[in-house]
Image (cartoon, helix red, strand yellow):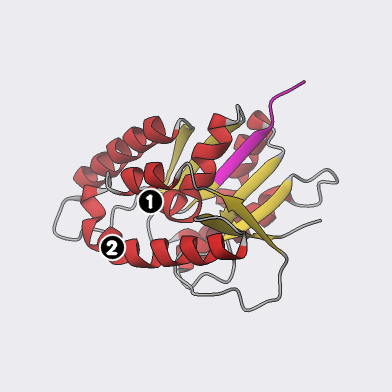
Amino acid sequence: MKKEKVLVLCSHSDDDVIGAGGTIAKYVKEKKDVKVVIFSSGEKSVPWLKESVIIKKRERESEKVSKILGCKIEFLGLPDMNLLKNIDEYAKKLRKVIIKFKPNKIITHSKYDLHPDHKAVFYILEKALGNRKNKPKIFTFLVWALFNPKDYAKVYVNIDDFFSEKIKALSVFKSQKFFIYINYLPVFLNNRLAGIKNKCKYAETFYVENA
């Protein structure tokens, strides 16, 4: 039996951990083949540092996180805060990744996220998949939003055994410590509330984008 392949798409190097860090670790433990693709280098996130410096910092942090969670990682190196402007071009890059990896499942940002780069990743994915008949199952998560305004079907993934790994991974992002610190409480509350709904301690919430 072939391994299930899960592709996680995110705009910046910490988004995958905030939205799906526990699930990534869980899937790896379950022997699934998990690959994270980071679209943007995040070079504008620390304006007082040279962009080349912050790119290297963020990539090193992500590589360290991939070892903690056990997943593969790929950087597309696309411009920060600019993903909505070249959807067609970026979709071609993503299409190559999808064709090569052949995922059964894709986890990515919701189009209802408030961050423009986050929703851009969703639209790039839509464009990359095009009219393919056999599309992977797509699940989305929220980072900069409290709720999904549409009544989507929700899936809760129990991460009781992996919540500590998620927090450990989040702590790696020293270059983003301000944003990470303000996210600790929302991450805890969101995962705890989802856990209550899933009758466990901690869970991550995903929205089903296709049947």
- The quadrant of the rendering that contains the C terminus is bottom right
Q: Is residue 120 above or below residue 49?
A: below
The mark found on residue 14 in the picture is 1
Q: Which residue, as the protein is rendered here, is positioned at the far right? A: 133
Percent from the top left, x then y, of residue 150? 68, 76
Callout 2, which amino acid? Phe
> Is residue 50 something one can see in this rendering?
yes
- The quadrant of the rendering that contains the N terminus is top right
From the image, tell me which residue sits under label 2. Answer: 179
Percent from the top left, x then y, of residue 25? 49, 38
- Specify whether residue 162 is painted magenta: no
103 horizontally vs 16: left or right: right
Label 2 with label 1: CB-CB less than 8 Å? yes
- Specify whether residue 5 is painted magenta: yes
Secondary structure beneath label 2: helix
- The stretch in magenta equals 1-8
